[in-house]
Amino acid sequence: MIRVLHSVSNMDRAGIETMLMNFYRHVDRDKVQFDFLQNKPDPGDYDEEIRALGGRLFVSPGFLSYPKYVAYMTDLLKEHPEYKIIHTHNGSLMLYALKAAQKNGVPVRIAHAHATAIPPGWKNEFKKLLKPRIKYAATEYWGCSNAAGKFYFTEKYWNKGHELIHNAIDTDTFAFDETARAKLRERYGLGDKFVLGHVGRLTKVKNQAKIIELFAAMHRQNANTHLVLVGTGELEGALKEQAASLGIAENVTFTGVQSNVNEWYSAFDTFVMTSFNEGLPVVAIEAQAADLPCVLCNTITREVRVIDSVTFLGLQDDAATWAKAVLDFTPQPRVSRKAEFRQAGYDIETEAKRMQQLYLDLYAAIK
């Protein structure tokens, strides 16, 4: 058995972490085991499951001090010489783990691109300085989409050799479920309303303020509508205030973090994303697996489209345009999309076997 050390933020129910757990559950753990180097001290939603699956969790001192980070990694790698593969998922900050691994002789260093822009924030300029150096510290270039890979590694390096790792899911888990739909709609008093849904952390980069705005326009056109936001984050209070100021607070439900996100896709009538940037969002793949029409921002790569009922709009388009796009979908009986997902490379059973073999081949090639 080989052990792969994944550098992550912390193992909460966020996009990258959920993607990793999808693969972790489906690899043969007698051949490949995942361990996680968390760079935030907060416990994660998946920690208990990781330990139950045989994984280890380590907590670094974080990214504020590069010398302290390297010292920690040096001690960790001395204590665990079995780590020959490190797989990093931290945007521009993955350079820390890659450089530390390089200094300590880790032969396989995978840089995994998950986004097509650097998120706004106080570290933005610092991250811009780090990004160009990643390609020199990594030995392997992986990405959730071609757009993400080219953004982080440049088109030249991406085209030299890369692995496109689809954000695959368990299509059976996310298939449309009429019983789950009825149960959630009854529990939350949604009845026969047209439900616009979104899943994601309530943060600036996800731009849920645009969703609140478009839903207000949508609700003016059709009063029998409701918005459901699944997730939590630092902007939850501000978004609730925005809904109240627009007079739609009673028509918006904030569910917080949910362990049954798959059932929520069945309860929705249309799914929406208005992010400032994304790589290839897992939630948009999950929504399509439930045969759920999607209205997505054109900051999201077209590679995300698996089924036909996906529309792309620009952030510059006004709320009325977005509202019309949502309401224009003609309701259709929802069916299984398993065949399309397998053909497109988003079925986790197939993709987990491919990732497992990539690790085994990389390990076998170590001199």
Image (tube, rainbow, N blue to C red):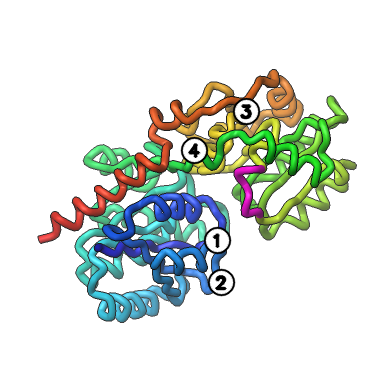
Q: Residues within 10 Å of mark 1 (few under 14, many from 20)?
A: some
In what element is the residue under mark 4? loop
Q: Distance of mark 2 from mark 3, alpha carbons?
A: 35 Å
Residue situated in front as seen by the camera: 145 or 309 = 309
Task: State yes or no: discs 1 and 3 in contact (Cβ < 8 Å).
Answer: no
Q: Is residue 208 visible?
A: yes
Return the residue at label 1. Answer: 12
Q: Nearer the viewer, residue 1 or 234?
A: 1
User: Which quadrant of the rendered structure holds the N terminus?
Assistant: bottom left
Q: Comparing marks 2 and 3, which lies closer to the viewer? A: 3
Q: CA distance from mark 4 to mark 3?
A: 16 Å
Question: Marks 4 and 3: which is nearer the front?
Answer: 4
Label 2 SS: loop
Looking at marks 4 and 1 on the same chain, the residue that comes earlier in the sequence is marked by 1
Q: Disc 2 marks which amino acid? A: Asp
* Residue of label 4: 171
Q: Nearer the viewer, mark 2 or mark 4?
A: 4
